[in-house]
Image (spheres, coloured by chain):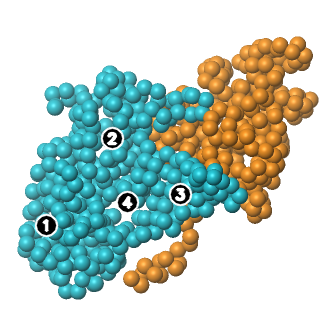
Chain colours: A orange, B cyan
Amino acid sequence: MLTEAVRSRSAPPLENPYQPYLARISRIHRMVPDNHLFQVRFLDARLVETWTHRPGQFVELSVIGTGEAPISISSSPTRPGILEFCVRRAGRVTNALYALPTNGLVGIRGPYGNGFPVEQMEGQDLLIVAGGLGMAPLRSLLWYALDNRDRFGTITLMYGAKTPGEMLFRDELVSLADLDSLNTLLTVDRDPTGTWAHHVGLLPELFKKVTLDPRRTYAAVVGPPVVYKFVLRELLAQRFPKDRILMSLERRMKCGVGKCGHCSVGYKYTCIHGPVFTYWDAINLPELV
Amino acid sequence: MKILKIPKKDLDLFASVLPAFGKLYAPVKRGSGYAFDQPASWSDVTLAYPRTILPPRKFFLPPREALFAFDAGAGYRDLLSEASERQVLFGVHAYDIHGLNILDRVFAQGRYSDPYYMTRRKNTAIIGIDFDPDAQHFARSMAADFADTGFDLFLSDIGDDYLVRVGTSRGDDMVVMSGCLLSEPTPDDIAEFKRRSSERVAAYRTGVELGDLPEILEMEYHSEVWKELGDRCLSCGSCSMVCPTCYCFDVADEVDLGARAGRRVRTWDSCLFRTHALVAGGENFRKNRSSRIMFRFYHKQRGFVAEYGRPSCVGCGRCIGACPAGIDIVSVIRMIRGQSDAH
């Protein structure tokens, strides 16, 4: 029995990957109806300091008494201190989150998932293609690249929404359009306001307005299925290598740590092998798209 | 490995030292089957049993388990201490030991480990025992008919005695505590072990060919077999509940009266359930039954092989007996292989 005693004394306490940490909602920005931006800050000062993530990763967000949901991180690790989540009001947990006031408490654990392979992407041109709500995870990558501007070649952002009113981060992105360091292409399917100063038309049409070098460009694409369908067609027509096309998936990532089984695609778990997959992965995982 | 033997007639004496290592569970008769349970006395224990209704997974991933207590102001307090009770499982078959070793790959190894599972695993001793395969066992095909790791002690029938393999220091503590019940085996005992071992290998009546199965599954992704199975499957999840290697779980917050505090509880789930791949907003990535039953087979026989180097199936045959629609994994594999003459 001595060995057991020695073992239990010397073993470090098990880290609990399911442990949520309390964070306070510092600001709620009503960006788009049913798509608010929540800014949160951990109560534990040590966590505020040590937290870091990769663009494209997600957290499990708990609303105390309701449950947990996977939420992608919209802020960049280059802007530490505050985490930003662009949350669509869609299910039980997000409805409960919308009922919380500024200064309300939530639980956060993570960050989870692989995120974008930024080390590989650095030194290359970057093409970010977002459709609809796909801007939520891509905004983290966009700011990461802008804050490390000298580490990337040309950076192109293509973002399409149905109308200007449904464009996430619209004011922020419109103001970026003036930057020389970013080629910003914003489009809407239609403009009921009549005041939209950018493109009107479908997202894939933006490809006519840029010249890309597929051999030295990483394309990061996030959007609804229809966006993947037409954007992938454009990228493949331009001979983008299939492993330089990156996409981020939505599944039911319940545990976030590769245990509970809900987010499986083919034989990968979205939460640990993804949510970022290359198009080559997609071809090899029959359930993926 | 230390190898000893114990007379069968002394097993009850040996069992009497085990409560010192934790609460004792062993196979006892329940209804028309057997279950791992606390025996009222040693005479209730049946060591020659075909399989238990539920695999020993229930001792490590309970069907229902509270992970955290929460409170609106204080947040989440883990309930790991509730997982710390010491247990001894007596009479576990080799395929079930393999089942636990497979769960270890998911819950204990890799980037994240599950502290609730790990705590129970650490605090639970396993005493294995051999068995005679029946028509539903195909453990040999799944390389799970013999355990060389994952037990504290393993008992093999050699006539009037059991040959005892000592797998861990804790197992050796049990031997030491039982005094002089165990002794060195003779060359004749070893010869008898080998004779019975090859007899047992020959006794398997059911088998499947694993070799190129993952690749054949890739080729048969659009097979009519999946549609046919989807038409028969009732999505009841019985096959997952009785499976030693299924581990899907769901988590829900249960609020106390007063609505300020409660518990975060996890429960067994199944990929056969309609809501398994449902996400907020209503999108369901596996809407129909054929896609779900197909996923179960692909995950076990294709995906797990790619990720962990072996299928997540140990050939216990429980799912064959549990399925109310008569879906039989052995005949499914034969159908996919185009061996329609079978069954």
Q: Residues within 10 Å of mark 2 (few under 14, many from 20)?
A: some
- Three-letter amino acid code at the position of disc 3: Leu
Chain that bears disc 2: B
| Labels 2 and 3: the sequence-earlier one | 3
Q: In this view, does A253 lie to the left or right of A35?
A: left
Amino acid type assigned to the residue bearing label 2 in the image: Ser
Residue B139 visible at all: yes
| Nearer to us in this view, A19 or B216 | A19
- Residue under pointer 2: B238
Task: Name which of mark 2 and mark 4 comes first in the sequence.
Answer: 4
Categorize mark 3 by other alpha carbons within 10 Å: few (<14), some (14-19), many (20+): many
Rendered location of residue A15, percent (x, y) = 58, 63
Q: Which chain carries label 1?
A: B
Which residue is pictured at 49% across the width and 51% down the height? B266
Residue found 36% across the figure and 49% down from its top: B245
* Residue wearing tag 4: B59
Task: Identify the subunit bearing mark 3.
Answer: B
Q: Where is residue A27 in the image (x, y as percent from the top left)?
A: 83, 44
- Furthest-right residue in this view: A178
Q: Do labels 2 and 3 share a chain?
A: yes
CB contact under 8 Å: marks 3 and 1: no
